[in-house]
Amino acid sequence: MAVVTLTIDDKPVSARAGDSVLAAAREAGIRIPTLCHLDGVSEAAACRLCLVQVEGRGRLQAACVTETAEGMIVRTQTDTLREYRRMILELLFTEGNHVCAVCVANGNCELQSLAAELGMDHVRYPYLNPARPVDVTHKQYAIDHNRCILCTRCVRTCDEIEGAHTWDVAGRGTLSHIVADMGQPWGESVTCTSCGKCVQACPTGALFRQGSTVAEMTKDREKLGDLVTARRDKKWTV
Amino acid sequence: MNHDELERIAGAERTAAKPAEIRCCTSSGCRASGSADVLKQLKAAVQAKGLSDRVAAVGVGCPGLCSAGPVVSTHPGGAVFGKVTSGHADGIVSTLSGGSTDAVRIDPNQPFFAKQFRIVRATVGQIDPERIESYIAADGYAGLYQALQQRPDEIVANVTASGLRGRGGAGYPTGLKWATVAKMPPGQKYVICNGDEGDPGAFMDRSVMEDAPHQVLEGMAIAAYAVGANQGYVYVRAEYPLAIERLQAAIHQATKAGVLGGNIFQTPFEFKVEIRIGAGAFVCGEETALIASVQGLRGTPRPRPPYPAESGLWDRPTLINNVETFATIPAILRNGANWFAGIGTATSKGTKIFSLTGKVKNAGLVEVPMGTTLREVVEQLGGGTADGRAVKAVQTGGPSGGCIPADLLDTPIDYESLGRIGSIMGSGGMIVMDDTDRMPEVARFFMEFCADESCGKCVPCRVGTVQLHGLLTKLVEKRATRHDLDLLIELCHFVKDTSLCGLGQSAPNPVLSTLRYFAGEYEALLQPEEFARPPRRSAIPLTVL
């Protein structure tokens, strides 16, 4: 297996050829914030939080889909990048109806913790206050579109790990929304296996198990990645 | 099909041609103003006057001057009539035998026609786009025949030497793209023609597909042979029903004639073409979104690399070029790379079609050599504004492009020069604005378009364009302050730098370019701050240059 060495934030890092900059950074203990990335499923490169500066490339690159290369020089923490990341979060907060105080995921939400981590303490743009529905037709789970940030982790998890492809995206622009099957209520979906993997994958309180208290809203995301590794490497025990 | 047969068809077509022809434009523009009826009446008038053996009334492609449609011309003689109604039919037919008509005469030698240099649209307006024989008589498919006498790598070298660059907007060297696909290991490869023209005010590709469908197919076949593909797709937007109809007919005729399908020109080369119809999404003009759409998936872009040349349609190497790019290829094969490289400027070769719209007098399609100045196009070919007001700006490149102020109209049209002044060549939309147009409103219009057309995949484009549109609305409605203008500029840089695909990356361009040249108009709309704000600290520059 070929190995490449590169520099991330002035730190020499080695990576397996084909690894993404994000994977290499994580292995070296360098944190790059992400929202749409989820271990175990393909990359969407949609949230743009993991944008980094790569020397010699004009455009900012999404670390999750940029392959490492020998001698590459990467910066993950410039002033501009930090500002842009805060702006991404600001825009997400204006787009949906994110009210942490009354959210089931309060304290267990990646959007919330990223805002705290990146110092996004206020929003400068007007809130769009969209009218979005809540679907509680499923007997165990529910989807609250107000809290959805369209990261499509659920779509990819359902398609790639569960193999059901119940979820997909309909509409476009800010009217984009997650749909079950052909737009039926979730409870009427004939493809949903009620496995709950999408609920585990969801970074916010958009997908949740009904009847759980806020304290019970912790999600076990590692399980999804472990499942993929186990299937791929036929290694079911640690 | 072989070379003799090609010549036989061309010969037969020329022999069958009547001494006189009355040509009526039957493309979308003129059709919308009733040219189908006009053609019917012209045919009836020829019949009624008993001239059928000497005169033919035929439908042809768009002669370009759309603002004067329906346009009819008579040959020989070359008289051109505009705004023709079916009532004029008798009179126009009689002019061939010395009669007169009250139809509006258009000067065929005016700069709009005389200053054009036609390569892509060379046969348009002269041949019947619905008959392959008509195209063959105008040297059609001779380029494909010549291509098949060469090795594929010779063709790639030829296209590279011609200096042709992609006409879809970005100007990527066509030869380099072909070489990349050709160098991928042999196996299933695809050729896709991007006919998803969606810029507001742009209709060059529609005209090429409607008026010279065979030329597009010939270009695609040559490309397929050069890169080693055997299957092609033409992706046309559903809003172009006539283009779809004519392409469909052209594919059928070409397959029947043996210039598409198996054993083309009795060689082992095989190439089939199918049409895929878009469902009205601007973003599907972006190549990776287009490929997803052809595969029947949701039309959203994906990060590149891998580029389609390496992994495109169904993960196979795919050559994807614009309609106009493909339609340029046959002429390069027939006349040689050197001939083509001799036209244009040092870095931008050949000609480019523009659709002149907006406040211009002669609205329509013009094809000019690269290096022609914007002033020549707008003032000479376009004839200035319709009501004589001063030209204020020219918008090129649609929602991805910029507004060029009147004092920069002497800029030559080439990829680099337009880029330097904050606009782009784009696919060829050219919207002329006069002194009654308000730039912040123009910027808002394009931003509304982008917000509407954003696929919703990445955050900066999905939400950023909506917020930009909100800020511009606030500004236009005179509710914005200096603080809002700062936010606007900052957000423009952000959307430009962080979006996933070209749509988002270029969406702020109309705002940035109007801010650059017409900052005064924005300033004039600002309201005083209600309360003092602390000086802003940001890593993002608040300038537009």
Image (tube, coloured by chain):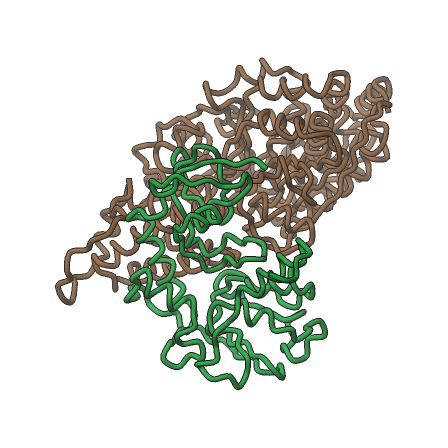
Tally of marks: 0
What residue lies at 62% left-to-right and 41% top-to-bottom? B194
In this orientation, does residue B427 appear? yes
Q: Write down the colour of chain A.
A: green
- Residue pushed farthest bottom? A211
Q: Which chain corresponds to the colour brown?
A: B
- Taking the image as shown, residue B52 lies to the left or right of residue A41, namely right
What residue lies at 73% left-to-right and 26% top-to-bottom? B225
Question: As displayed, is residue A201 above or below residue B273?
Answer: below
Residue B16 placement (x, y as % from top left): 83, 25
Query: To which quarter of the image does residue B187 belong?
Result: top right
Residue B127 placement (x, y as % from top left): 71, 30
- Near-viewer residue (B105 or A128): A128
In this orientation, does residue B127 appear? no
- Near-viewer residue (B249 or B102): B249
Question: As displayed, is residue B211 above or below residue B440?
Answer: above
